[in-house]
Image (cartoon, rainbow, N blue to C red):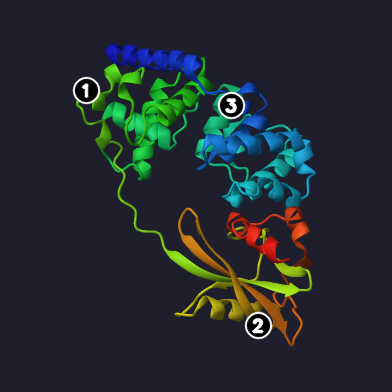
Amino acid sequence: MIGDIILEKKFSLTLLHWYHDNKRPMPWRESRDPYHIWLSEVMLQQTQVATVIPYYTRFIEKYPTIEDLARAEDQDVLKLWEGLGYYRRCHHFLAAIRQVRTHHKGKVPDNSDVFLKLPGVGAYTTAAVMSIAFGQALPVVDGNVIRVMARYYCLGEDSTKASTRKHILEKMSGLIPKESPGDFNQAVMELGARVCLPKNPMCPACPIHETCCAFKADTVIDYPNIPKKNRIPEYLVGLAVIVRGKTFLIQKRPDTGHLAGMWELPGGKTLNNESMEQALQRKCLEELGVHVQIKETLACVSHVYSHFKIRLTVFVCHEDKKTVNALKKQPILWITVDDLGNYPFPSANHKFFPALCSIL
């Protein structure tokens, strides 16, 4: 028992020393503001650090305080988030910030149970914010932590199961020091991101490799146990650039669901062996009450989301007889290419915007 405690203490101190000497400079690490730290953790979910940094910097410049963000227009915030993906994070964060302003006097709650009840907040975000911003000894468990712990202890159970995450959480709870829990959590994640890599881990550079169970057994690459995923489905989507003079039509997506609140071209995915031309004509009739005449193909692009991918074919179209009308009560607008920067669009749309700008 005493030996285990000594080993845990050595693990923590060694990793903290390594982290202090090797941590990457990140703008949120320069702040102790819980709002800034919370924002960074939300943005970093399923997104690489290099991608997040410019978004985080622009966001803090425009909305430096909770009050600034709580008072912002939804569309302005969504536009600032445009391209970062996983837009539900943005909607939840904005809703949570408004609750903080209304119910917590504009201060991020330092009570983990209270914080956990805010929109979009889960166990990982709670542990990260509570440990980094408030110094509470709550361990985090993310993909990097799972990989480091699975290798260090040779944990062979299915890493996607809740029971495995619970097991790793228990291991982390025995390691996390009360004096610097935030740095420790960041140290484990930093080690996983930079040294204990999924492929080609750099074991000789790891500060804890001498006591790592998998390294000693030469089985590092066998951990963690990640079951093979099924191939994600691909959907074929036809989109219409409905042209009226120098303008074209965009419509707003519903306020809930996938890509909520974003703007897009009319159209949709194919059903029952439809062609993409047939799909966009059906959707235009359903949503706009108009038949469209397809003039030419503008662009073909592909885009990958977390659980599916899409192949978009964009067609230049004209209205046929009837005038466009938003039958499903989703807002529509006629804009020029110069207006594109005023509205938030899904990342996939930006891939064909250059072609669109070249014809209008």
Q: Quadrant of residue 353?
A: bottom right
Amino acid type, residue under disc 1 in the picture: Lys
Circle 1 residue: 216
Tell me which residue sits at (30%, 51%) in the image: 228
Amino acid type, residue under disc 2 in the picture: Gln
Circle 3 residue: 26
Residues at marks 3 and 1 touching, judged by CB atoms closer than 8 Å: no
Q: Position of residue 160 (x, y in %)?
A: 36, 45
> Which residue is situated farthest in the left direction here?
217
Point out the frontmost of discs 2 and 3: 2
Circle 2 residue: 293
Secondary element at tag 1: helix
> Left of 287 or right of it: where is 144?
left
Dot 1 or dot 2, earlier in sequence: 1
Q: Position of residue 81 (x, y in %)?
A: 66, 46
Distance from the alpha carbon under mark 1 to that under mark 2: 68 Å
Tell me which residue sits at (73%, 73%) in the image: 243
> Left of 175 or right of it: where is 271?
right
Q: Position of residue 14 (x, y in %)?
A: 40, 14
Tell me which residue sits at (59%, 60%) in the image: 257
Amino acid type, residue under disc 3 in the picture: Met
Please say whether residue 312 is visible from this viewpoint. yes
Dot 2 or dot 3, earlier in sequence: 3
Residues at marks 1 and 2 touching, judged by CB atoms closer than 8 Å: no
Distance from the alpha carbon under mark 2 to that under mark 3: 51 Å
Tell me which residue sits at (66%, 31%) in the image: 36
Q: Position of residue 113 (x, y in %)?
A: 57, 36
Secondary element at tag 2: strand
- In the picture, the disc for residue 64 is none
Secondary element at tag 3: loop
